[in-house]
Image (cartoon, rainbow, N blue to C red):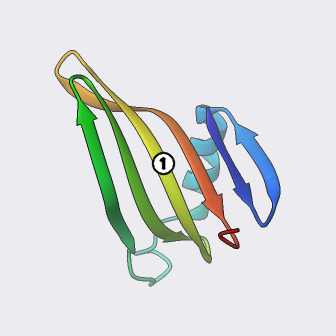
Amino acid sequence: MITGHKDGRFTEMHLDTFVDFAASQGSAQAADEPFDMLIVSLDVTGNVAVVKVTDHYIGHDFIDYLALLKKDGQWRIYNKLWHSGPLT
């Protein structure tokens, strides 16, 4: 599940819906925009991890929290929470 707040509005969508939406937006490269993502923090305990990233996407600045799980030797994003808009 992809869940977050954009400009004070709560948004929740299933992974398939988010993937379709992201694919419809095209890449930063195709839009002749720089790719802008920064890993702010990474916390790993055993086979679980939480990553905080900042990124600029579709004209907005986002803060994403990604919950990861290591399964069969590969890290996978299990959940994504995000925020865009004022930080209050």
Q: Which of the two residues, 37 or 43, is positioned nearer the viewer here?
A: 43
The answer to which image quadrant residue 36 occupies is bottom left
**Amino acid type shown at disc 1:** Tyr
Which residue is at the far left?
A: 73
Q: Position of residue 59 (x, y in %)?
A: 62, 77
Which residue is at the far front?
A: 88
Residue placed at 60% from the left, 33% from the top? 16
Relative to 35, 43 lies left or right:
left
Q: Secondary structure at mark 1?
A: strand
Q: Position of residue 46 (x, y in %)?
A: 21, 23
Name above or below for residue 35 compared with residue 70.
below
> Quadrant where the N terminus lies?
top right
The answer to which image quadrant residue 32 occupies is bottom left
Q: Position of residue 31 (x, y in %)?
A: 50, 79
Q: Which residue is mark 1?
A: 65
Which residue is at the far top?
A: 72
> Quadrant where the C terminus lies?
bottom right
Name above or below for residue 25 compared with residue 76.
below
Residue placed at 64% from the left, 50% from the top? 21
Q: Which of the two residues, 19 or 80, is positioned nearer the viewer here?
A: 80
Relative to 48, 31 lies left or right:
right
Relative to 52, 9 lies left or right:
right
Q: Position of residue 28 (x, y in %)?
A: 45, 73
